[in-house]
Amino acid sequence: MDRSLPETKRLRRDVEWALQRALDPGTVLPMLHRLSRLADVGSDEGVYAQRRLAELLADHHPWRAALCARRVLSVQPRDDGAWAILAMCHALLGNHRCAVAAYRRALDLSPENAAYAHNLGHLLDIALGRPADALSWLRSAYARTHGRTDVAVSLAHALGRAGALAEATKVSRRALRAADTSCLREHVAIAEWLAAGAQAEPKLSPRRPPSRAARAPWKRVDAARPAPPEPGDVVDLDSLLKKGLVNLPLDAKQRERARGLARDPAVESTLPSDAATRASVAAAIAYAIVFVDRVPLTQAEVAASFRVSVHALRGQLKALRARIELSTSQACAAVVRPR
């Protein structure tokens, strides 16, 4: 340890090292709390600690996470990521109007962010019952994500509620023709709802605020009750990764790093045979990339994309950590964020 550095800088360096190596948020929380106490208010180290605490606490302590996000914004009011975290915390707490306002601030600072636009549009449609106001945001997200499946579900739902049945049917049919089937049940429900004239709500569309188990307000997958694998499901890990990654806002390089980690011998040699557990392994690999690259997604959101529970994801995350430590240096580099 370099004793020539101030304690706060050493703590931040240790936290960054732990985040790159451990992949388990719980192991760094004590260090982050200590760093937040020692660092001067408004210092780089203090802001760093509050932002990371906001990210890591949001799943189980949204009120505390919101306080941390506000401390960041008091120093860096143009931090769009902090506004997005604050919005997600408000959504989880049921403060939907506050969540909408925070997402608008995030989009003012990062207007090209499709995830923010999707979240804002879906909140306007589902939580506030304003589908017409949601359409511009959902159309923008749909165009920027090239018709990603979960965005297509949200757009078709808002279009149907707004009375644009022809456009909603077109979006729904295009999504049903896509090769990806990760949101097949949702698309079928939307298609049947539209065919019936969009009178009653589709069965799989949530009518209540997001719960702790499924925090993302734009998700229609219940992460607390994972769907059991159907007979004949593909259990190849690479295929499971492809199906889950399509619903996450990762770029091509991040997706390739995830697939490269899945092909590592240390991971392949200990893979279970059943599809459900392999899906949890795929979710853990995806979250490893999300966590190291600081993508503003939570474990609940990643788990929902792979139709597994948060508990299953966390269990495989711990096992993945042990496997990586025994893996080659090249495999370790697959989950380390590029400098």
Image (cartoon, rainbow, N blue to C red):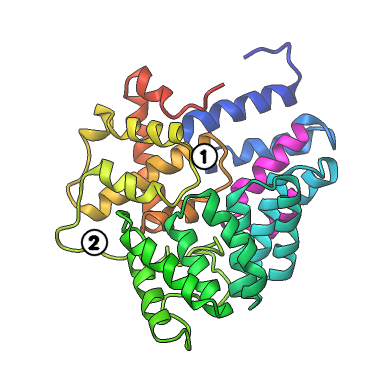
x, y percent for residue 190: 41, 74
* SS class, disc 1: helix
Residue 223 image offset from top left, x and y in percent: 42, 63
Tell me if I can see residue 92 in this picture: no
Residue 215 found in image quarter: bottom right
Q: How many angstroms separate mark 1 from mark 2 (CA)?
A: 26 Å
Q: 111 left or right of 77?
A: left
Residue 159 is situated, as x and y percent measured from the top left of the image, at 54, 73
Camera-side residue of 92 and 33:
92
Q: Which picture quadrant has residue 253? A: top left
Amino acid type of the residue that numbered disc 1 sits on in the rendered structure: Phe
Q: Secondary structure at mark 2?
A: loop
Q: Which mark is residue 229?
A: 2
Please identify the residue farthest to the left as the structure is shown: 232
Please name the amino acid that badge 2 sits on: Pro
Viewer-proximal residue, 148 or 101?
Answer: 148
Q: What residue range appears in magenta?
A: 45-69
Reply above or below: 35 against 272. Answer: above
- Numbered badge on residue 238: none
Q: Residue at x 58, y 61 (%)?
A: 138
Residue at (50%, 40%) from the top-left corner? Answer: 290
Position of the C terminus, as image quadrant, is top right
Residue 291, numbered circle: 1
Relative image position of residue 178 (x, y in whole percent) = 33, 56
* Magenta stretch holds residue 62: yes
Would residue 91 be counted in the magenta stretch?
no
Q: Note whether 62 is above or below 9 in the view shown.
A: below
